[in-house]
């Protein structure tokens, strides 16, 4: 299983627009991706309600994990998204 730790760059964290953009990208990743908060709660990264339920704030470290062919590339793409302030785009 591939894992990647990422710090959330969006100024409001993973709420509203950033959470929606992230969940949509996770749904298109081609592999099931789990998002785990610093508190240790995990959700399906493709679920907008799951992502919102974590209450992830700005500069919080999260862990992305996926298993299967293409998992590393999918995590790299999603990590790049989280490293961008999605509120400014």
Image (cartoon, rainbow, N blue to C red):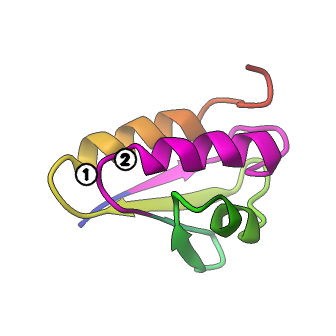
Is 12 one of the magenta-colored residues?
Answer: yes
| Residue positioned 85% across, 44% down in the render | 12
Extreme left residue here?
69
In this figure, which residue is indicated by the disc labeled 1?
71
> Residue 55: which disc?
none
Which residue shows up at 33% across the image and 44% down it?
Answer: 74
Kindly indicate the quadrant of the structure image that contains residue 48: bottom right
Identify which residue, 32 or 41, lies in the foreground: 32
Q: What residue span does the magenta drawing correspond to?
A: 4-33
* Residue indicated by mark 2: 75
In three-dimensional space, the C-alpha distance between marks 1 and 2, rounded to whole angstroms, equals 6 Å
Q: In which quarter of the image is the C terminus?
A: top right
Q: Is residue 40 above or below residue 84?
A: below
Picture quadrant where residue 36 is located: bottom right
- Is disc 1 in contact with disc 2, using a CB cutoff of under 8 Å? yes
Depth check: give the residue in front, 31 or 37.
31
Secondary element type, mark 1: helix
Q: In the rendered structure, does residue 43 fall within the stretch colored magenta? A: no
- Mark 2 lies on a secondary structure that is helix
Residue 4 position, x and y percent, is 40, 54
Count of labels in the image: 2
């Amino acid at each position: 299983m591939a894992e990647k730790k990422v710090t959330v760059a969006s100024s409001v964290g993973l709420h509203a627009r950033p959470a929606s953009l992230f969940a949509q990208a996770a749904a298109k990743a081609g592999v099931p991706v789990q998002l785990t908060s610093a508190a240790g709660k995990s959700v399906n990264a493709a679920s907008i309600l799951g992502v919102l339920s974590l209450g992830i704030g700005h500069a919080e470290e999260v862990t992305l994990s996926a298993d299967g062919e293409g998992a590393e590339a999918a995590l790299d793409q999603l990590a790049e998204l989280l490293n961008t302030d999605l509120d400014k785009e």
